[in-house]
Image (spheres, helix red, strand yellow):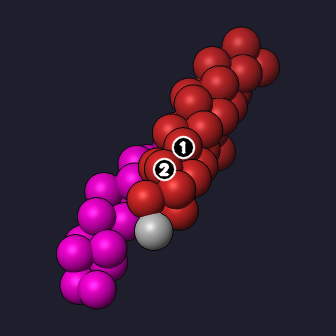
Amino acid sequence: MASSVDSSTKPDDDVRQLYKRYQSATTEEERHEIALEMGRLDAERHADIYAALETE
């Protein structure tokens, strides 16, 4: 169980960093690029969750 907690720390840190970058973005184009990065990260996390569920 501890391993699942440890593995979620890195993605959570990535999300926090992206959110901070989004808040400090000065242009709409910059915010758009950061939002795309957030979407990719979210998709990866969902893929990992579904893969884990399939192996249970």
Image coords of residue 8 (percent x, y): 37, 66
Q: Which of marks 1 and 2 is in front?
A: 2
Q: Mark 1 points at which residue?
A: 47
Q: In which quarter of the image is the C terminus?
A: bottom left
Secondary structure beneath dot 2 equals helix
Crowding near the residue tagged with mark 1, few <14, some 14–19, many ≥20 C-alpha atoms within 10 Å = few
**How far from the left and from the top, in percent, is residue 49?**
52, 57
Q: Residue at x 52, y 56 (%)?
A: 54
Q: Position of residue 28 (x, y in %)?
A: 77, 20
Q: Which residue is depicted at the point 32% across and 78% down? A: 5
The answer to whether residue 47 is seen in the rendering is yes
Residue appearing at x 71%, y 13% in the figure: 29
Q: Name the residue at the right extreme.
A: 28
Quarter of the figure with the N terminus: bottom left
> Could you tell me if the residues under marks 1 and 2 are in contact, i.e. CB atoms within 8 Å?
yes
Residues under labels 1 and 2: Cα distance?
6 Å
Q: What residue type is labelled 1?
A: Ala
The question of residue 10 being in magenta is answered with: yes
- The label number, if any, that marks residue 51 in the structure image: 2
Seen in the picture, residue 49 relative to 47 is either above or below; the reply is: below
- The region drawn magenta spans 1-19
Name the secondary structure under disc 1: helix
Q: Is residue 10 above or below residue 42?
A: below
Give amino acid for label 2: Ala
Mark yes or no: residue 20 visible: no
